[in-house]
Amino acid sequence: MTTTGMLDVTADVLTKFTWNYVQDNPALVKLYEKGKVSQWNATTDIDWTPEVVFGEPDPEMTPEAREMIDNFMGFNSPDSPFAGMNENERIRMGWEFQSWMVSQFMHGEQGALVATARLVETVPDIDAKYYGANQVADEARHVEAYARYINDKLGADHAYEISAPLEALLVDIMTEKRWDITYLGMQIMVEGLALAAFGMGNVLFRDPVIKQITDYVMRDEARHVAFGVLALKEAIPQLSSAELADREEFLLEAIDLMYQRFLLEQVWERVGIDVEKGKAFARNNPLMIIFRQMLFSKIVPNVNKLGLMTSAVRQRFEELQVIQWASTPDSASEELAAADA
Ligand SMILES: [Fe+2]
Ligand SMILES: [Fe+2]
């Protein structure tokens, strides 16, 4: 099946012009300069020549990667819905997982493209408008690269529609008129999760083309998450307690949607595994739990850095067992240190 349909979101937005063109945010200036020299071309920088055959075993898979996938899918545990699958069925599951993940990357990237275009309009400062514009070009390239991979390499028949929780989150983000919530949703939550997911995806992915695309995309994403942290760091402390409570509520909703995103409903449906059984497996399998916890590794430190670790947010992170990331470096510090190096 190819992905079809469309989604319309209505919003009441406040467009901001500024007549102050002084670039007075040195950290954002540095990030913008780095963005300008880090542009790449999806047409010419990616090697599109390797053949990708959905369902084929990967001749270069290491025994470690193989073991990880076996554990991840629970192939060897008797309570897994995959127990008893033969070799070909196992290989197909790996490809389905890859198709699902790349499809969600593609849809999420379009969300980032559209949300960042909105930010260019709604952020008050010239530095943030410049950087936002730079990011719009990055996101267009990301959508382009993933879409081309799906259409030309994997085969459009294997694509997945956007998952319901991701769609709900995009609607939440795009209905929002307050620019800092757009940032919070897109730059901190969606992109933070994507950054971690790309890294893990690259261990599980089965062909060199997708690995190369994802390596390029990740470099850009590290900058984007840093942008979110830098832009919000100054805005959050100025919020009233009522405004902060709204951000907290948004954050809690986003955390739940992101967590649900990885119960893999659509994959179970496609391969004909009972959806409730599949979801129960995704909820309880130890490696799947670790996988979901890893997905929050680029979210928790940034939420903490921004001063949004309220007791309710902390409690939610504790329940999901991801609170340990709070003490790791935030993305802006990491990215700016890398820019200096
Ligand atoms: Fe992106
Ligand atoms: Fe991004």
Image: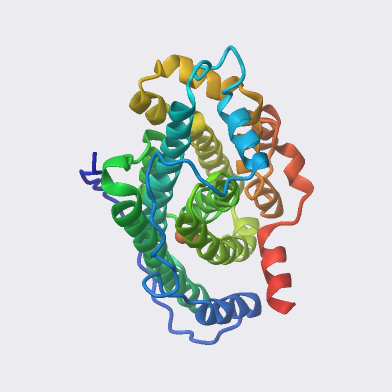
Left or right for 101, reference 64: left
State the quadrant of the C terminus.
bottom right
Q: Position of residue 175 (x, y in %)?
A: 35, 48
Residue 124 position within the rendered picture, expressed as x and y whole percent measured from the top left = 47, 71
Where on the picture, by quarter, is residue 289?
top right
For image coordinates 46% across by 55% down, the residue present is 210
In the image, is 315 to the left or to the right of 83?
right
Residue 1 as seen in the image, left or right of residue 55: left
Q: Is residue 176 visible?
A: no
Q: Splitting the image into 4 quarters, where does residue 335 fall?
A: bottom right
Asked whether the viewer can see residue 208, the reply is yes
93 to the left or right of 270: right
User: Residue 132's spot in the image, x, y percent?
Assistant: 46, 70
Task: Please give the name of the residue rendered at 22% of the width and 46% of the height, measured from the top-left corner.
Answer: 6
Extreme residue toward the left, this view: 5
Residue found at the far bottom of this picture: 22
Task: Residue lying at the far front in this picture: please name it.
Answer: 59
Q: Residue at x 24, y 47 (%)?
A: 8
How far across and how far down the image is residue 314, in percent? 70, 36
Of residue 261 and residue 248, the one placed in the foreground of this image is 261
Whether 239 is drawn above or below 265: the answer is below
Q: Which quadrant is the N terminus positioned in?
A: top left
Q: How many marks?
A: 0
